[in-house]
Amino acid sequence: MSRCPPEVSPLFRIVPAVVSAHGTLDVGLPPAPPMFRFADETESTNAMHAAGFMGVAFSEVPALLEFAVDELTDYFRHAFVRTTMVLDRQTPEARVRIKQELRRQFAPFAAEGMVRLPLPALVVSGIRR
């Protein structure tokens, strides 16, 4: 299973854009593997073939990420390791701006005190030769 890319998942579109606009993503962390590497069908197919699978198929699985509006900042600080490290390395002023903008950006997904974000996943399957 792979994460769907930012074009499909608002979470992965909003968070980096907000941090870039009100802080910085360049906080001295070591490079990480490409987050959406296996969301690319060509890349996934090549990896599956290299691992001995054929008949590679893709299906998007709908999922919903839910958390309380009041826990927005804490949720992101604890749910995603790299996001936690990026947020921890912001200036205090940037953290305040980021928190305010995240609340604003996630408002369209909020109702009755809960944020409900679509977070679809891509399931890649195949048959072992």
Image: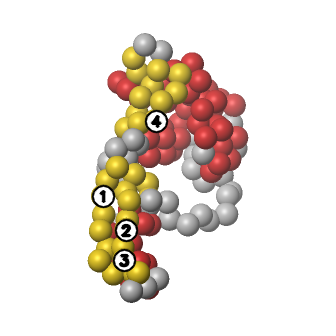
| First reached walking from the N terminus: tag 2 or tag 1 | 1
Please, what is the three-letter code of the amino acid marked with disc 1?
Ser
Mark toward the viewer: 1 or 4: 1
The residues tagged by marks 1 and 3 sit, at their Cα atoms, a distance apart of 15 Å
Task: Look at mark 3 in the image and give the residue it sits on.
Answer: 127
- In the image, 41: left or right of 34? left
Q: Residue at x 48, y 30 (%)?
A: 66
Whether tag 2 and tag 1 are in contact, CB under 8 A, the answer is yes
The residues tagged by marks 1 and 4 sit, at their Cα atoms, a distance apart of 19 Å
Q: Can residue 94 be seen in this view?
A: no
Label 2, residues with CA under 10 Å away: few <14, some 14-19, many ≥20? some
Whether tag 3 and tag 2 are in contact, CB under 8 A, the answer is no
The residues tagged by marks 4 and 2 sit, at their Cα atoms, a distance apart of 24 Å
Q: Residue 94, image x and y in percent?
A: 61, 33
Could you tell me which quadrant the N terminus lies in? bottom left
Element type where label 1 sits in the image: strand
Please, what is the three-letter code of the amino acid marked with disc 2?
Ser
Whether tag 1 and tag 3 are in contact, CB under 8 A, the answer is no
Label 3, residues with CA under 10 Å away: few <14, some 14-19, many ≥20? few
| First reached walking from the N terminus: tag 1 or tag 4 | 1
Label 4, residues with CA under 10 Å away: few <14, some 14-19, many ≥20? few
Please, what is the three-letter code of the amino acid marked with disc 3?
Ile
Instruction: Check the image and report above or below for 27 versus 101.
Output: below
Task: Look at mark 2 in the image and give the residue it sits on.
Answer: 125
Mark toward the viewer: 3 or 4: 3
Label 1, residues with CA under 10 Å away: few <14, some 14-19, many ≥20? few
Q: Which residue is drawn at 65% across and 38% down?
A: 78
| First reached walking from the N terminus: tag 3 or tag 4 | 4
Task: Look at mark 1 in the image and give the residue it sits on.
Answer: 59
Q: Residue 102, image x and y in percent?
A: 49, 30
